[in-house]
Amino acid sequence: MSLKIGLIGCSNTALKNFIPLMAVSDFTKLGFIASRSSTKAQDWARKFRCESFGSYDEIIESNVDLIYMPLPIGLHEKWIIKAAKSGKHILCEKSSTTSYESAKKIIKVCKENDVRILEAFSYRFHPQHEHVQNLIKNEIGTLQNFVGNFGFAPPPKDNIRWNKKLGGGVLNDAACYPICASRMMLKKEPISVIAKLMLDKEYEVDTKADIFLKFSDEKTAFISSGFDNYYQSNYEIWGSKGKISANRAYAVPKDFVTSIYLEKDDKIFETKFSDVNQFELMLKEFCDVIKNKKENSFNFEEDLLNQAKVMDAIRISSVQDRQVFLSEFN
């Protein structure tokens, strides 16, 4: 049985990743398209052969099983809560929230209404990262640290990344990726954070982030991200006996060939991955979890909460210019 999925928000992200998949998917069916503009909703429905369309409130009351939500971050809490209360499962684009308190509220409502929510870090489902985890386990000795970068050229000034009220800024939009990856690869949560976020004076959003995460057993992660950078989407993992590098770790187009490099014993070994649709793999697992009530590869809701907690610790560290311990949060 295919799950009926609805789209809330006719965004470029949806157009690039979600809509093409709906045209060929055998495990989901596009059941509703919602937009603030009735004209745009109708145009998209006609173009992409979707029978139902309308407003955000109308999709909440529709008969879809699952809602994909690529809305601006500042709107997530309101519409996640509405969707959860109507019994809809939610696939929400990162970052899911603007604060840890918001994340706790969202997860509470989802649990009360017996619905699942997944923060859409689709890169997690790319097989290259499972390969990296195997290399960590078998090839590089004792893991020492993680270094991750994600940055790109400045977006146009009318882009929502510059909109403070809608949750703009490099932390919410880009730095969140290597933050999540560090937690995934070290398989634990940081115990403290030291961070500096550089603010744009005109738009009052952070445009550069440098973040130091300390984990137990003296493991560390350093993360750098920015809106005025040569494009970087990578990470390195150092161990006592080798180093692993991912050259295109986060935003990976379907037709892009990625490489994982293992440096060991003065040799470099390359493993390539091609023809991978990480968005499809993410949606497949989420649908499988919903339909079959199976165990997921990680706890979706707990991970969302832990990610939000680290993000808040980063914000506090930057504002108060101090080391912030994750134990300070309830």
Image (cartoon, rainbow, N blue to C red):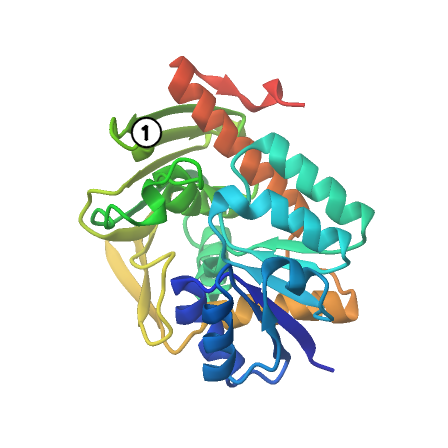
Residue sitting at x 50%, y 61% = 9
Q: Name the foreground residue: 168 vs 197.
A: 168
Instruction: Identify the image quadrant of residue 205.
Output: top left
* The C terminus lies in quadrant: top right
Where's the N terminus, which quadrant?
Answer: bottom right
Name the foreground residue: 15 vs 134: 15
Residue 171 location (% of width, % of height): 39, 38
**Where residue 287 appears, x then y in whole percent?**
67, 69
Between 59 and 74, the one lying in front of the other is 59
Report helix, strand or loop for mark 1.
loop
Vertical comparison of 321 with 244: above or below: above
Can you tell which quarter of the image residue 210 is in? top left
Q: Is residue 97 above or below residue 3?
A: above
Q: Which residue is mark 1?
A: 204
One can see residue 34 in this view: yes
Image location (x, y in percent) of residue 184: 52, 47
Corner quadrant of residue 295: bottom right
The residue sitting at 20% across, 49% down in the picture is 153
User: In the image, is residue 255 above or below residue 149?
Assistant: below
Q: Amino acid at mark 1?
A: Glu
In this view, the residue in front, 278 or 157, is 157
